[in-house]
Image (cartoon, grey):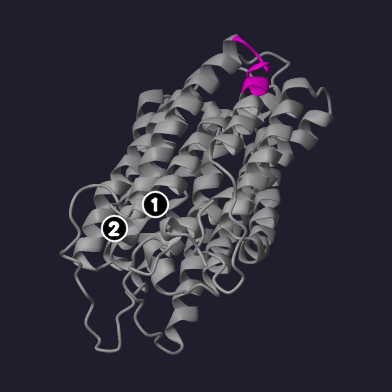
Amino acid sequence: MPSPEGSVAHALPDPEPIAGQAPTQIRRLGWLHFANDFTLDFLTPLLPVGVGIAWIGVMEGLADGTGQVLKLFTGRASDRSGRRAAWVQAGYLVNAGARPLAGVGMLLMWPWWIIACRITDRIGKGLRGSATDALVADWTDGRTRARAFAHMRTMDHLGATVGGLAAAGTAYVLTADQLGWAVVALVVVTASVVWLAGGLRDRAPATGKIPAHAGVVGWWPHAPHMRRPLTAIAIATVAVKLSPLLILAQVTGITDDSSASSPPVWVFALGWAGLGLVQAAAASLSGLLTARLGPAVMLRLAWLAAAVVFTGLAWAEGPWRWVVGLGYGVVSGMTEGAEKTWVADLAPTGQRALCFGALALITAIAALIGNGLGGVLLTYWGSEVFQVLAAAAIVAIFLTGPVIPPNHASIHENVP
């Protein structure tokens, strides 16, 4: 039997499944993730054209932090209203506008405009993020939830792969001052994102009435058993969740200047696509392993792998840097689906979006620290910073306590 601290018996029961709708909604969400990440990851590897590497870590940390903090507020609002789909649709609408507009900044050489568009884009993610995760949890149960969250991450990374390949081909054909036009043309693809989002529906119980959880009080999950998973993930995030842009900057040797030592933009974009493909494969495998081992065990394995990868980034030279850099894709693919499964399984039904918002807030603070310091230290200190991060990942594993062996009858109801 799980310990009282890990019990979720007090959680509100899920509504009865509605035949046929759950697979349809999960598939639609999956394709929505694919199309959305295509546009995101077409744009992202082209950002060094308009924003210096020394500023990328700060930009990514600030943008992601803004969106993640917003998730706490929108998650609480989603729980109180009992509605998810409307928040998801609003967020994707903001994304659909912000990304093509970043191309205007690239054409006019306005770094501040690009940074503003990036922050606005993350605001869109903040509007939809907690509600999206709660919607996935609402439409699934313990038997299918881990695979559903892994499916979302797989579709994310497949979209990133195709978007990165498209960006590489575009950068190979066009000159740097023409790339902004290609980004503006993303408006064609973002129209499909808006259409897919329009078909999302909330899951209602058999009565057909969506419950509003007006009893949600405060701005933080009050269930005691949520403290340890949130703390564990926060500690690990500082160490292991650097922006993939910084990882690729290290692997490819890209610099802020236009010296001959810096690779062409299309090489950077091709590396981004390769990273996305590895992440997709790792996310798919992670879903199977998480369902079997439990999310807590899966996360510790990922954090251990992160320590190995960061050690390699600190010391690898030549082609080995590419091998180790792709290894970071394995770590990234292993973690997020397991994190969300862990939180979804433990969160009371009426506080799911709030718990996802809390997860987003603590990871935002940790990621802001990691990305901000990582970008500056990588520029002025060098690859030795990865050795420090490897040590921090090891510390995170031990600081979060021992793992309670999963009860195979109720595999996700235990906390480590």
Residue at the image position 56 percent from the left and 31 percent from the top: 239
Residue type of the residue flagged with mark 2: Ala
Say few, some or many: other residues with alpha carbon within 10 Å of mark 1 (under 14 / 14 to 19 / 20 or more). many
Secondary structure, mark 2, is helix
Distance between the Cα atoms at labels 2 and 1?
Answer: 28 Å
Secondary structure, mark 1, is helix
Say few, some or many: other residues with alpha carbon within 10 Å of mark 2 (under 14 / 14 to 19 / 20 or more). some
Q: Nearer the viewer, residue 227 or 254?
A: 227
Q: Is residue 167 left or right of residue 129?
A: right
Q: Is residue 367 left or right of residue 335?
A: left
- Residue 32, given in percent of the width and then of the height, sits at 47, 64
Provide the residue span drawn in magenta.
381-388
Residue at the image position 50 percent from the left and 27 percent from the top: 370
Q: Which of the two discs, 2 and 1, labels the residue nearer the N terminus?
A: 2
Res. 169 in view: no
Q: Nearer the viewer, residue 129 or 172?
A: 129
- Above-or-below relation of 128 to 232: below
Q: Nearer the viewer, residue 49 or 321?
A: 321
- Above-or-below relation of 383 to 5: above
- Residue 10, given in percent of the width and then of the height, sits at 33, 68
Task: Say which residue label 1 marks.
Answer: 226
- Residue 119, given in percent of the width and then of the height, sits at 35, 36
Q: Is residue 385 magenta?
A: yes
Identity of the residue furthest to the left in this view: 214
Residue at the image position 58 percent from the left and 65 percent from the top: 151
Instruction: Tell me, for residue 90, which label it has, or none.
Output: 2
